[in-house]
Image (cartoon, rainbow, N blue to C red):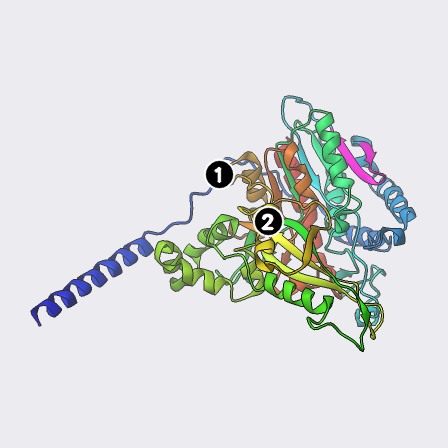
Amino acid sequence: MKTAAKIGLGLGGTAVLLAGVIAVRTATFKAPAAADLSGVKLAPAVAVDRALAAQHLSQAIQIRTISHQDRADDQPAEWDRLHTWLTATYPAAHAAMGREVVAGHTLIYTWKGSDPALAPIVLMAHQDVVPVTPGTEADWKHPPFGGVIADGAVWGRGAIDDKGSLVTLFEGAEILARHGFKPRRTVMIVSGHDEEVRGEGARAAAAWMKAKGIRAEFVLDEGQAVISDNPITGGPVVLIGLAEKGYGTLKVTARAPGGHSSSPPKDGGGVVTLSKAVTAIAENPFPMKFSGPGAAMLASLAPDGPPAIRMAVANSWLFSPLIVAQTAATPAGAALLHTTIAPTMLKGSPKENVLPQDATAWINYRIAPGDTSADVMAKAKAAVGDLPVDLTWVKTPDEPSPVSSTSSLGWKTIAAVAGDLAKAPVAPGLVTAGTDSRYLGPVAKDVYRFQPMTFSLAGTTMIHGTNEHLSLANLEQCVQFYARLIATAAR
């Protein structure tokens, strides 16, 4: 009994000590040291003609620069129309900037600064949009390529992704140029024409910059936004992507003799083999980790979150499994913490009574920083074991991007302008989709991903979806952001 009592007292003392450590760490917890933004001298607000900007976005939406999966369905003349429209609509900006065209339709603008010793900044927004899913046109409140201005918004495919950025970026540049702004630091605008199909435009722009010996101070592209109902704080938060996941699609092929379906083989044939392989891969996920940009976002916001979140993040050495479990409660949250595996396409026999000679599946991976495409291939091969399938990449995968700094000039400038406009805290984040900016990493010190638009979490679902629209308030906020960012960073 004495021994048991001693053990009990020892465990009790340990529990009290542990509780004390948790309480102290929680009470003293602060977000990771953030860059001091007080030294950033913000440019003043500009006068924005909201109605005119809305008309311009409406016109841009009506130009159908649609990138199809089958590029043969694209209409190059629409990109020519867009280029002509940009030149006519923004004469002061075009007079101030030089223009190059690479890879057919990708645009590179250069607004030369007076001090060539300063590395340029690069602002990006792509020209192309995704198609509207056939058969869903009637589900739209307004025609998807009508550019209708109604209910306090501009409606149509690309209103957000990414003509909203392209138009408002030029609106901001036009305002500055019209009022005689002369940059000290060179400003570049890179507008890819085929971002939605992982095309060649941005790669060509990066190659052009490399050949010219250009290394940007920072690059800013689409990626994250201001979330009005951030689940951690319950209020608005400016999320700026420090990195983005890699991208690769694995092709899984099961070869088989084929034949008539009336005499199936004992093993079920290629379709059965393929289904076993895909299931094996999907049921062997990458582990989730409380690390990287996703964890940095949680750590930055936890001090403003509920007590339970603050306690867990302050004591992640103990509670990281709980943090991971809670974050992974939603697919979007889980995607922040690991490489994702998504079987998306299947192909078998062309006829219901014919056994296929090959059955094929396509599995899309979004590769988290810290993993590589080689890791993905090794894990897939281990999962399928001795199943008779071939594993190949559809295209050479894009590796995860480097993680950009949160203490650099680029971060300070973008965070200061965005935070001032949104009147909200700023936090780093991870972009789980892909952007053109990944290709400019080798020609830039840092790459950031942020659209100056405010959305609820539910509102983000319209991107690539039905009823995509940009509110007039967001439209004006974007113009203000780009004008002030250029004037702040380049003066």
Give me the disc on residue 276.
Answer: none
Residue 135 coordinates in the image, percent (x, y):
84, 70
Q: Secondary structure at mark 1?
A: loop
Q: Is residue 2 left or right of residue 348?
A: left
Q: How busy is the neighbourhood of tag 1: few (under 14 within 10 Å), some, or many (20 plus)?
A: few
- N-term mark: 1 or 2: 1
Residue 451 seen in this snapshot: no
Q: Amino acid at mark 2?
A: Leu
Q: Please give the name of the residue rendered at 69% of the width and 64% of the height, measured from the top-left corner.
A: 274
The residue lying furthest to the bottom in this view is 262
Q: 457 or 86: which is nearer to us?
A: 457
Q: Amino acid at mark 1?
A: Ser
Between 366 and 184, the residue placed more toward the observer is 366
Q: Quadrant of the C terminus?
A: top right
- Mark drawn on residue 421: 2
Q: Quadrant of residue 464?
A: bottom right
User: Looking at the rendering, which quadrant does residue 3 occupy?
Assistant: bottom left
Mark 1, residue position: 38
The N terminus is located in which quarter?
A: bottom left
Q: Nearer the viewer, residue 72 or 273?
A: 273
For image coordinates 89% across by 49% down, the residue present is 78
Secondary structure under tag 2 reads helix
Q: Is residue 296 above or below residue 459?
A: above
What residue range appears in magenta?
99-111
